[in-house]
């Protein structure tokens, strides 16, 4: 957290974070065009923010896209603010939303965190039902091979759909799969009314990707990329609050053996 606090102390870096909070997924050129700073200065500030894990970057072709990363903000809220004044935690809620209706060749949500574990253990945490039900109330039935079908089991509901499949599976490095269908049974279980469910079902099929990068023998960098989202769709709002909680639960489970309380996530 020390690096995050030092990075936030500079007003120019806070301006960059404000810009990314308004529109995440910007290139260096786009960030420079909105701020009265030289390109070299912006690059240096972005490097500090990235080192503090307050932003994360994704390459798309020749472009390098910059995203606000909610993980350190979330950790500050969990450790400090909830301890002293839980009612004000919601003041940081917008900073957890790294989402925006960007062009469709750009990811819509990027979230990075560091976990004291191994790539093998993290892979198990993402795929093994004995782990996923503990921090997510979700289990998957699949052989985790590229192209294989996936059956989702969320609480007491089994979700089967032809669009649910493994997109990419490179053990201990990268995992990607399509999102589940929004069935009436699922909606009833998570208390979503029929009008809202129908709107969700009408949205394009989205995809989530987990990138696993070992940092040293005791720490792994996990980046979650949820893309192919419908611009201004309902799912955007749902995952903006859902993914930070799911990943915080996973991190806590792998590091302590127990997930955070109240793991209910839609």
Image (cartoon, rainbow, N blue to C red):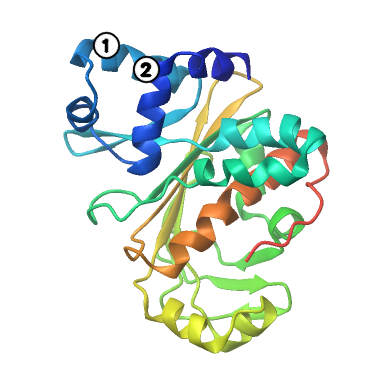
Identify which residue is drawn at 72% across, 63% down.
137
Indicate the secondary structure of the residue bearing disc 2. Answer: helix
CA gap between label 1 and label 2 equals: 9 Å
Residue at horizontal 53%, vertical 44%?
96
Report crowding for label 2: few under 14, some 14 to 19, many 20 or more residues within 10 A (C-alpha).
some
x%, y% of residue 93? 57, 46
Q: Which quadrant holds residue 155?
A: bottom right
Mark 1 or 2 closer to N-term? 2
Residue 61: give x, y in percent of width and height. 18, 39
Classify mark 1: residues with Cα within 10 Å, few (<14), some (14-19) or many (20+).
few
Mark count: 2
Nearer to the camera, 162 or 51: 51
Q: Residue at x 40, y 50 (%)?
A: 99
Apparent side of residue 239 relative to residue 154 in the rendered image (left or right): left
* Position above or below: 148 against 227: below
For label 2, the residue is 12
Q: Give the residue pinned by disc 1.
A: 41
Q: Which mark is residue 173?
A: none
Looking at the rendered image, the disc whose residue lies closer to the viewer, 1 or 2, is: 2
Reply above or below: 38 against 25: above
Image-based side of 45 in relation to 41, left or right? right
Query: Which of the 4 image quarters holds residue 66?
Result: top left
Q: Where is the N terminus found, in terms of image quarters?
A: top right
């Amino acid at each position: 957290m020390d690096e995050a606090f030092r990075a936030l102390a500079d007003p120019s870096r806070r301006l960059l974070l404000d810009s990314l909070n308004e529109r995440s997924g910007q290139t260096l050129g786009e960030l420079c065009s909105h701020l009265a700073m030289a390109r070299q200065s912006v690059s240096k500030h972005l490097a500090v923010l990235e080192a503090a894990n307050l932003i994360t970057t994704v390459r798309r072709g020749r472009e390098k896209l910059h995203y606000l990363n909610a993980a350190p903000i979330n950790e500050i809220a969990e450790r400090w603010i909830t301890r002293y004044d839980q009612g004000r935690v919601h003041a940081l809620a917008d900073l957890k939303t790294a989402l925006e209706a960007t062009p469709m060749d750009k990811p819509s949500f990027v979230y990075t965190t560091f976990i004291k574990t191994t790539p093998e253990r993290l892979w198990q945490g993402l795929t093994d039902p004995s782990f996923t039900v503990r921090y997510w109330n979700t289990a998957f039935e699949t052989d985790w091979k590229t192209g294989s079908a996936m059956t989702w089991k969320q609480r007491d509901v089994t979700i089967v759909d032809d669009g649910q499949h493994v997109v990419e599976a490179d053990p201990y490095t990268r995992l990607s799969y399509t999102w589940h269908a929004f069935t009436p049974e699922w909606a009833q279980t998570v208390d979503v009314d029929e009008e809202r469910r129908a709107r969700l079902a009408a949205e394009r099929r989205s995809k989530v990707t987990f990138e696993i990068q070992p940092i040293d023998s005791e720490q792994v960098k996990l980046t979650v990329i949820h893309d192919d989202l419908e611009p201004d769709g309902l799912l955007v709002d749902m995952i903006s609050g859902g993914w930070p909680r799911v990943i915080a639960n996973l991190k806590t489970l792998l590091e302590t053996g127990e997930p955070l309380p109240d793991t209910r996530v839609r």
